[in-house]
Image: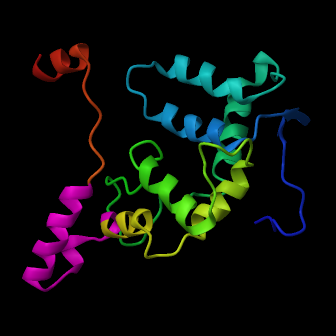
Amino acid sequence: MMNLLYEELPDSVIVAGSSYPIYTDFREWLKFHDLQEESALSQNEKAFLMLTRYKKSPPITHIQEALEALVKFAVRDKVSNHSQNSNAKSTEKILSWSYDSPYIYTAFLSVYGIDLLQIEYMHWYVFLSLFDGLPEDTPIKQRIMYRSINLASITDKNERKRIRKIKQAIKIPNEKLTAYQTGDFFG
């Protein structure tokens, strides 16, 4: 894990032994994550759009490695804390950068005085560190906490009912199905 206090923030990734500069602003990486969930795009279209994070493209012969390098950068070269939670069910999403954006925006504004709409640039790793450091009582952290609760671990029936109601109210909506997907579902 890198130490933001004295290590230089990365502005490139290594592909096939060479360094390739990438865009590092947090907005690019929020879009990168949203792109992963875009059901209207094919895997090839997603891969092409993912590669636009490079300022200078790696050789076509190393596309898979180039994509993997971007994913590693996106999660700070480790498994994301937001996707792995010991209390979370593996199929439940506990954070959506897009759906939860109003809560992320207001948390940064109220806690740090940072207006994410007005800030010219913020490195992705700085953004993630600030996000990780948000107090647990902010609405976004509360949403993540409630979404991650495993209802089966709650023995009190009334408490389980209360938490289920909260989870339902803050659940990240499922993707809308395209007409083609709907046809496949019923076909």
Please name whichever residue, 116 or 49, is drawn nearer the observer in this view of the structure: 116
Vertical order, 111 against 16 (above or below): below
Please name whichever residue, 150 or 28, is drawn nearer the observer in this view of the structure: 28
The quadrant in which the C terminus is found is: top left
Q: Is residue 150 magenta?
A: yes
Residue 24 lies, in percent from the top left, at 75, 41
Q: Is residue 77 visible?
A: no
Report the number of discs.
0
The quadrant in which the N terminus is found is: bottom right
Q: Is residue 118 visible?
A: yes
User: How would you classify the magenta stretch by its main secondary structure?
Assistant: helix
Residue 133 lies, in percent from the top left, at 60, 71
Vertical order, 14 against 45 (above or below): below
Rendered image quadrant of residue 111 = bottom right
Residue 73 lies, in percent from the top left, at 71, 46
Residue 149 lies, in percent from the top left, at 30, 71
Q: Residue at x 27, y 43 (%)?
A: 173
Rendered image quadrant of residue 25 = top right
Magenta range? 147-170
User: In the visual, does 4 lie left or right of 84?
Assistant: right
Please name whichever residue, 130 or 174, is drawn nearer the observer in this view of the structure: 130
Rendered image quadrant of residue 60 = top right
Q: Residue at x 84, y 23 (%)?
A: 56
Q: Is residue 177 magenta?
A: no
Q: Residue at x 24, y 20 (%)?
A: 181
Vertical order, 5 against 37 (above or below): below
